[in-house]
Amino acid sequence: MGEAEVDGRRCGIVQADGRACARPVESGAPVNLCTEHLLVAHDWVAREAGVTDLLPTPCAACGSPVGVRYASGWVCAECEWRVGNRPDDELLRPVVEVVYYIRYRDQVKIGTSTNPRMRLATLPHDELLAFERGGRTLEQRRHAQFAEHRFPGTEWFAVHDALLAHVGELREGVDDPWSQYGRWVSRALARDGA
């Protein structure tokens, strides 16, 4: 007998015929939904938030095999180039990898991007909290660091003191995270001789 059956919680969905769903709540679920209705909710959210998966073919801009699938099509998970677009021959902007921290209600997402303006435009959020220089390795370290407060299977974390303290350290002396990111890109341009 699963945990949901022990505590007697049942799915909170009212079906089309007016009857409540009788299935037990998925063990550990953050909301009172059975497995079937959690999957329906996931598919609904995935239309906007995207699903990470292998690209049909490697990215034409950077060669990464991993992408994010949206209802409107695929983008590369590394450089966020839209699959199907052909990279032009003009000078590409420098790659500046960042770990971003965004707040949506009482949750914080810790993610990474080489094109945060495009990435954050696709994510629901109330506030950009901070940027931190680094890529996937740093992102994974932060996920492990705050794992106790992570919502299973997501990059979202409950707001808690240690995470707020970390964001506070990143924000120290930074009035606007976008200005900070702009300085990092400018330095990379100067370094690369563009």
Image (tube, grey):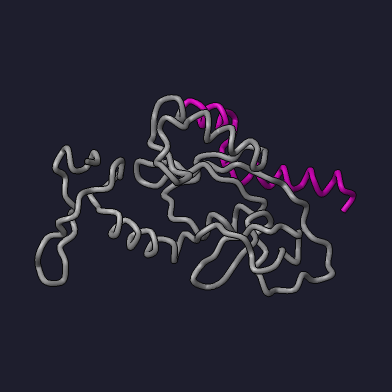
Number of callouts: 0
Q: Is residue 122 depicted above or below 160 in this figure?
A: below
**Outermost residue toward the left?**
18
Query: Which residue occupies the foreground of this view, 68 or 112?
Result: 68
Is 162 placed left or right of 111 in the picture?
Answer: left
Residue 45 percent location from the top left of the image: 39, 61
Q: Is residue 177 magenta?
A: yes
Is 119 placed left or right of 36 in the picture?
Answer: right
Residue at the image position 50 percent from the left and 61 percent from the top: 50
Is 148 placed left or right of 172 in the picture?
Answer: left
Report the span colored magenta.
165-194
Residue 6 percent location from the top left of the image: 17, 38
Q: Is residue 18 depicted above or below 31 in this figure?
A: below
Q: Which image quadrant is residue 108 in? A: top left
Residue at the image position 12 percent from the left and 60 percent from the top: 20
**Outermost residue toward the right?**
193
Query: Which residue occupies the foreground of this view, 8 or 81?
Result: 8
Q: Is residue 169 magenta?
A: yes
Q: Is residue 82 depicted above or below 105 in this figure?
A: below
Q: Which image quadrant is residue 47 in? A: bottom left
